[in-house]
């Protein structure tokens, strides 16, 4: 099929890139994302007719450009969690290349490839691609990209696209856990792992759907089932919502039972399970976009796993077991650790996380280096020394200097000291239960966790914690809670929070300060 000269590009005026969407201050207060863009397509053209342009897409295109510059006969594999938008990204690349007047090939079926060129749009059988390659060299568009959506019936790109003599640079979207295939080696394909969607992206994407969910329902789905647009938006059929959620919970719970009964087990051993992708979330490993790792997909699922493990007779070692479950094989512990932090905060008096050094994160609200001492440390230590007598005290010292921001009264902190008391050998005879038997039982390491309510807190334990205080003492952005941990001598306290993916509604920053002043050490 050919649209003739100008037939396709004549419609270019029907394509437009909408202006930036400005997010009002009343929507959400902790948005770090830049304003988002929407690509709008003409009516009756293709689906979807409105496409959210993620910042992720620009990063992926930069990765493609760098790869093409160094290996023009190679290619890039686009991978990510099912339903994350890999095919949508290919469609975005297709549209943008067309608008730029660049030739491009697109394949999503095994028997044909579409060629978009200045002379028209052509549907070509896959056995004619060799002729297309020759024509490409003659027409001087040998730098064209070939987009291939590998999924379902299409198991690999057309053979002529895989030839090392092919003039096309290959960009293929592949399902997760595809493994290395011979065709990937033939074209020296390098992987790019897409990030999960943020809450802001999920929310804006919802406004582009034909049937939209309310913000409350959408956020509930997001926190229960994860940051995957396909999952979030499939619940737009209101009458099926409760039934679908119940069915999904049952299937997820069944997999969590397997996790519980089969411990010890590595995450990769569960990958063949049909519901694996509803429990574990594929994402890139920090800044390395070529490496795939897995997190628990949501706080809700993390709690299910935790609750099942807590039912085990030997409950005292549950935190380290859950950490091992997610960390073995290079998996990420972030979300599970956030669940552990929540339980450590408000629930169990026997739970303790030990034996590994503290994890420090970038991009957290307040960070403290080990070299922070002098006045701020002195102020903090003096405050800690009077901690038992000042549960109802409040302060507003500068967060930039590493000092305590704000301390609520005693009911919120009893759980902390119950947890700590299980590791001390006596010495808790004060009415508040936090005075050590000897000064040497305190460490010189101080940990601070900062909690700030911003839009809502999507964790039941922290919500319960906040409900213990009057409205004027609730944690806010301007007046967050700060919690001081005093770590036992010669023991490591392990406690993480996910400060990037799941802190949209709650700022939780774990910070570490080491006091090096000998005078202060003696006081401890």
Image (cartoon, rainbow, N blue to C red):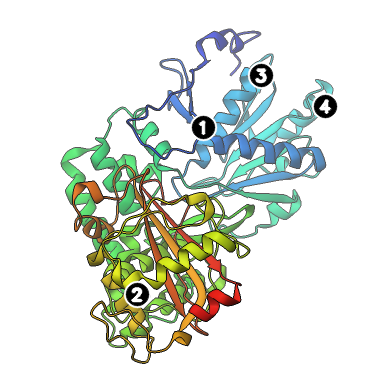
Depth-wise, is mark 3 or mark 4 nearer the camera? Answer: 3
- Which is more toward the observer, 329 or 185? 329
Q: Which residue is mark 3?
A: 100
Depth-wise, is mark 4 or mark 1 nearer the camera? Answer: 1
Considering the image in quadrants, where does the N terminus appear?
A: top right
State the separation of the CA atoms marked 1 and 3. 24 Å
State the separation of the CA atoms marked 2 and 1. 41 Å
Q: Label 2's element?
A: helix
Q: Label 1's element?
A: loop
Q: Which mark is residue 137?
A: 4
Q: Label 3's element?
A: loop
> How dense is the environment of label 1, judged by Cα within 10 Å: few (below 14), some, or many (20 and up)?
few
Q: Which residue is mark 2?
A: 258
> How dense is the environment of label 2, judged by Cα within 10 Å: few (below 14), some, or many (20 and up)?
few
Q: Position of residue 132 (x, y in %)?
A: 74, 28
Q: Which mark is residue 34?
A: 1
Numbered disc total: 4
Q: Is residue 396 visible?
A: yes
Q: Earlier in the sequence, mark 1 or mark 3?
A: 1
> How dense is the environment of label 4, judged by Cα within 10 Å: few (below 14), some, or many (20 and up)?
few
Q: Label 4's element?
A: helix
- Which is more toward the observer, 338 or 183? 338
Q: Earlier in the sequence, mark 4 or mark 2?
A: 4
> How dense is the environment of label 3, judged by Cα within 10 Å: few (below 14), some, or many (20 and up)?
few
Q: Earlier in the sequence, mark 4 or mark 1?
A: 1
């Amino acid at each position: 099929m050919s649209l003739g000269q100008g037939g396709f590009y004549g419609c270019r005026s029907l394509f437009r890139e909408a202006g930036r969407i400005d997010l009002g201050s009343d929507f959400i207060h902790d948005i770090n994302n830049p304003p988002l863009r929407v690509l709008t397509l003409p009516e009756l053209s293709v689906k979807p007719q409105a496409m959210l342009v993620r910042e992720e897409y620009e990063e992926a295109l930069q990765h493609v450009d760098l790869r093409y510059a160094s290996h023009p006969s190679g290619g890039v594999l686009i991978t990510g969690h099912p339903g994350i938008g890999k095919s949508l990204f290919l469609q975005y690349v297709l549209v943008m290349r067309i608008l730029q007047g660049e030739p491009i090939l697109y394949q999503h079926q095994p028997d044909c490839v579409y060629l978009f060129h200045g002379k028209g749009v052509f549907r070509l059988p896959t056995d004619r691609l060799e002729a297309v390659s020759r024509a490409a060299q003659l027409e001087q568009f040998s730098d064209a990209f070939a987009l291939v959506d590998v999924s379902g019936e299409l198991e690999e790109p057309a053979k002529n696209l895989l030839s090392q003599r092919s003039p096309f640079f290959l960009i293929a979207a592949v399902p997760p856990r595809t493994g290395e295939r011979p065709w990937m080696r033939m074209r020296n394909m390098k992987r790019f792992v897409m990030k999960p969607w943020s809450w802001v992206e999920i929310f804006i994407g919802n406004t582009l759907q034909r049937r939209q969910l309310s913000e409350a329902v959408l956020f509930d789905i997001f926190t229960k089932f994860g940051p995957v647009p396909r999952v979030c938006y499939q619940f737009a059929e209101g009458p099926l919502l409760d039934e679908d959620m119940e069915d999904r919970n049952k299937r997820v719970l069944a997999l969590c039972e397997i996790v519980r009964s089969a411990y010890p087990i590595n995450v990769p051993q569960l990958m063949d399970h049909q519901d694996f992708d509803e429990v574990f979330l594929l994402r890139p490993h920090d800044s390395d976009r070529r490496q795939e790792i897995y997190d628990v997909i949501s706080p809700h699922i993390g709690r299910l796993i935790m609750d099942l493990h807590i039912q085990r007779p030997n409950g005292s070692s549950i935190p380290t077991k859950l950490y091992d479950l997610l960390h073995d094989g290079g998996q990420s512990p972030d979300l599970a650790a956030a669940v552990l932090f929540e339980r450590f905060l408000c629930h169990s008096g026997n739970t303790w996380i030990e034996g590994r050094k503290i994890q420090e994160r970038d991009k957290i609200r307040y960070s403290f280096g080990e070299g922070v001492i002098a006045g701020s440390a002195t102020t903090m230590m003096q405050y800690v020394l009077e901690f038992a007598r000042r549960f109802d005290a409040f302060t507003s010292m500068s967060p930039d200097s590493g000092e305590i921001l704000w301390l609520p009264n005693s009911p919120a902190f009893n759980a902390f000291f119950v947890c700590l008391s299980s590791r001390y050998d006596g010495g808790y005879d004060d009415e508040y239960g936090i005075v050590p038997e000897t000064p040497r039982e305190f460490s010189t390491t101080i940990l601070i966790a900062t909690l700030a309510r911003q839009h809502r807190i999507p964790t039941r334990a922290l919500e319960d914690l906040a409900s213990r205080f009057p409205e004027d003492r609730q944690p806010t952005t301007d007046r967050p809670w700060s919690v001081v941990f005093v770590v036992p001598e010669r023991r490591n306290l392990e406690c993480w929070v996910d400060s990037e993916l799941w802190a949209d509604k709650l700022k939780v920053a774990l910070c570490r300060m080491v006091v090096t002043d000998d005078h202060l050490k003696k006081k401890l």
